[in-house]
Image (spheres, rainbow, N blue to C red):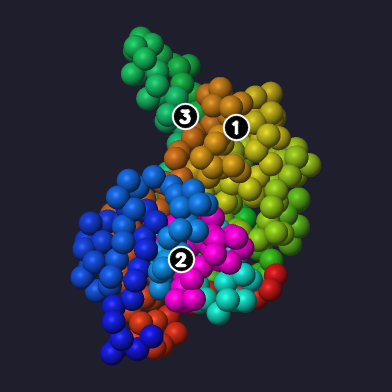
């Protein structure tokens, strides 16, 4: 579509920040989901029939059936989010539909939240909050609400990409020693900057860390990366943090090990079957549970919206969106 053409018809599946929506309405022929409720597959199918551009989020499953139902004019799926595992890339490619995302804008926000959970779980912050709000606090006592010291502990980072490195930089300031497992060893200058030790064996790293934080991509290889077997390698005094993908952990096995005290605690922002959370996790005091909010900052959402706008406008001008996602066929 060239700049001389009429405004592209854009369908947005969820409510976006007001500034983003206003700009989108100004630039394009835009339809919004006024209810902000996640759309059913039938509603998504209806939406793609007469749209030129679909703007979905991670709550929308753009599977083969939805793509197949798209009208001939749908040529761009401009996803509002970094991950694209909710989009059937092969089906989109078969229909010559370009897919774009919003990478690189959530690194610092996600790293902030990972660091918050690294602090919150060992120091029992949410337990303390519940104690005070519930009226159970009777004043300071020498052995009350004892947690674990952060300073001097070993942090094991699974996935040393942009977010993993951002977490490492923060963790250094809290006196943690940095260890990591990655498919490939990072450059020597990065290891030197982060004072990081590479572990070729994930199993061995898990058995030696005090805190483990997950920052791996969503791929078939990372499904249950922390399986029941691997979770049993974690020490009973250690903590697990996940702000990455819920399916990276065997959630049922984690809940069982947390309950029996085989793992000291956890901080989770993502879950295997969102928005459903394993009910056994909800019963535990030694796990901090957040509603997938690592990227939820005003600045981050505005940056994401700006990327969506640029991707759509670039496509409308007849060029390849800068954040086009390439289907590797994996």
- Residue 251, given in percent of the width and then of the height, sits at 65, 38
| 241 and 55: which is toward the camera | 55
Of mark 3 and mark 1, the one earlier in the sequence is: 3
Circle 3 or circle 1, nearest the eye: 1
Neighbour tally class for label 2: few under 14, some 14-19, many 20 plus, Cα within 10 Å = some
What residue is rendered at 37% in x and 63% in y?
11
What residue is rendered at 32% in x and 46% in y?
35
Label 3 sits on residue: 124
Name the secondary structure under disc 3: loop
| 144 and 265: which is toward the camera | 265
Label 1 sits on residue: 278
Label 3 to label 1, Cα distance in Å? 21 Å
Of mark 1 and mark 2, the one earlier in the sequence is: 2
Label 2 sits on residue: 49
Label 2 to label 3, Cα distance in Å? 50 Å
Q: Main secondary structure of the magenta part?
A: loop
Neighbour tally class for label 1: few under 14, some 14-19, many 20 plus, Cα within 10 Å = some
**Is there CB contact under 8 Å for labels 1 and 2?**
no
Circle 2 or circle 3, nearest the eye: 2
| 260 and 269: which is toward the camera | 269
What residue is rendered at 59% in x and 42% in y?
273
Stretch of the chain drawn in magenta: 56-85
């Amino acid at each position: 579509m060239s700049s001389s053409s009429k405004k592209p018809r854009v369908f947005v599946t969820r409510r976006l920040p007001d500034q983003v929506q206003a700009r989108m309405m100004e630039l394009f022929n835009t339809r919004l989901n006024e209810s902000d409720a996640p759309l059913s597959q039938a509603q998504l199918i209806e939406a793609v029939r007469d749209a030129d551009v679909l703007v979905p989020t991670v709550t929308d499953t753009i599977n083969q059936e939805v793509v197949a139902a798209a009208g001939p004019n749908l040529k761009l799926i401009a996803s509002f989010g970094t991950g694209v595992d909710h989009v059937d890339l092969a089906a989109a490619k078969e229909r010559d539909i370009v897919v774009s995302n919003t990478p690189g804008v959530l690194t610092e926000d996600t790293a902030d939240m990972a660091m918050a959970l690294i602090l919150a779980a060992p120091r029992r912050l949410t337990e303390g909050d519940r104690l005070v709000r519930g009226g159970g606090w009777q004043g300071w006592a020498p052995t009350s609400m004892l947690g674990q010291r952060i300073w001097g502990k070993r942090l094991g980072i699974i996935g040393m990409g942009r977010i993993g490195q951002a977490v490492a930089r923060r963790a250094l300031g809290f006196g943690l020693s940095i260890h990591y497992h990655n498919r490939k060893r990072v450059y020597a200058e990065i290891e030197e900057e982060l004072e990081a030790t590479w572990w070729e064996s994930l199993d061995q790293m898990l058995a030696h860390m005090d805190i483990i934080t997950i920052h791996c991509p969503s791929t078939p290889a990372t499904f249950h990366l922390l399986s029941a077997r691997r979770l049993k390698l974690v020490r009973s005094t250690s903590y697990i943090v996940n702000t990455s993908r819920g399916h990276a952990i065997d959630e049922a096995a984690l809940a069982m090990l947390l309950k029996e005290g085989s793992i000291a605690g956890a901080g989770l922002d993502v879950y295997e079957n969102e928005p459903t959370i394993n009910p056994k996790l909800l019963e535990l005091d030694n796990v901090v549970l957040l509603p997938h909010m690592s990227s939820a900052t005003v600045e981050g959402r505005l940056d994401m919206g700006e990327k969506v706008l640029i991707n759509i406008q670039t496509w409308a001008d007849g060029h390849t969106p800068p954040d086009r996602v390439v289907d590797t066929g994996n």
